[in-house]
Image (cartoon, helix red, strand yellow):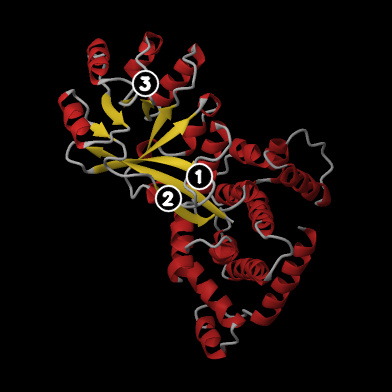
Amino acid sequence: MYGYIARQPIFNKAKETIGYELLFRDGEANAFPKIDADEATSKLIMQHHLLMGVEKVTSNKLAFINFSEETLLHHFPTSIKPESMVIEVLETVPPTPELLATLKYLKELGYQLALDDHDFDPKWDPFLPFISYLKVDVQQFNLLQISRHLRRVADYPFTLLAERVETAEQFEKLKLMGFQLFQGYFFARPEMLKHKQLSSNKANLLALMAEASACTLDFERLADICQRDLGLSYKLLRFINHSGQNQAITSVKHAMVYMGEAELKKFIALLALANLQDGSPDELLRQSLVRARFCDALANHVKLTKNPPSSFLTGLFSNVHLIVEQPQDELLAQLPLLTEVKLALLKREGQFGHFLKLTEALEQADWPLTDDLLQSLPEGADLAPMYLEAVAWAESLLRQV
């Protein structure tokens, strides 16, 4: 299954691209799908930001993203860095006190705000001090009407952006009227990008893996992700029950705190990776689990300890890019893994990279390379039993998850 996104460039007076308005699409017809604005924004963020990164979609230029009332009030925009985006408030959003408070909060966090298809109704005047961009549909008014409206709001410090500019004559006249940014078919029609997408469930799983790899766990964030998926919550509680704990668990967050960070990090990463698969686990997943356990065993042998368990995560993440069919460097850029882990995965550098190279040498039965890599480990590393134990552990885990 593929995800689709349209991006329409936004230009300055010199016709230089300064950003893109991102538009969710559901197919190659390049038309807006028959879904509501909340769902469109949610899909745009989950399917494209999480996997590709907004910066990649916009070539490191500003992303103008439409937000409806619900997505704004629930602070959806805060999942993207403030410097990467402009929050567009849809023209259908009612100007309520709650919305004004939300926009003030987002402004304080560093986000730039835009009013989309602004109609110059005075009811929006209390919002104007917090607005960075005022977008005006120049097909909605004639030039005389636009000029009159602009005089009334001339004291506010926003940048004027003209939408639906369709002729060179319009472009020249709008420049004289004070518009600084422009968007429309005169410049470029929306172009469509396509990439392999994850289902919303798998996006949650990848988000869990990202959170589990952070140095310090955010239990609130983890619980929020888990609670979106009943199956994940059930498996977490079942895991705790099977581990012999006898304390009554009152919530998903309580369960996570009770497990402790080290075990929770491993469990979440394992559970998420296992559930990224469609149907039965295949060899990529099996290999990832074996690598995770074996790399962890090697770290224990050399008495290397870190939080998070970085050697374990190095093996576990070694095949994620193949499982979700994403370029490895792009995928890792979206995950808060330690630099040492990323260097191990991308370049096989450092201690963790050494463990991974040794694991791969064993997988490929490259005995000369195995012996060579073994020389740098302390004496007494009996690889065969360690590797067989890792295989048995992986098979046992696959039966559970």
What is the C-alpha distance between the residues marked 1 and 3?
24 Å
Residue 372 at x, y = what percent? 50, 86
Who is closer to the viewer here, 243 or 76? 76
Where 284 sits versus 59, above or below?
below
Name the disc covering residue 25, or none. Answer: 1
Classify 10 Å Cα crowding around label 1: few (below 14), some (14-19), many (20 and above). many
Quadrant in which the C terminus appears: bottom right
Is residue 323 shown to the viewer in this render? Answer: yes
Q: Residue at x 75, y 72 (%)?
A: 392
Where 138 sits versus 274, above or below?
above
Disc 3 vs disc 2: Cβ atoms closer than 8 Å?
no
Q: Residue at x 63, y 71 (%)?
A: 294
Disc 2 vs disc 1: Cβ atoms closer than 8 Å?
yes
Q: Amino acid at mark 2?
A: Met
Q: Which residue is mark 2?
A: 192
Is residue 314 shown to the viewer in this render? Answer: no
Q: Amino acid at mark 1?
A: Arg
The first of marks 1 and 3 along the sequence is 1
Q: Quadrant of residue 143?
A: top left
Quadrant in which the N terminus appears: bottom right
Who is closer to the viewer here, 390 or 49? 49
Label 2 secondary element: strand
The first of marks 3 and 2 along the sequence is 3
Q: Which residue is mark 3?
A: 118
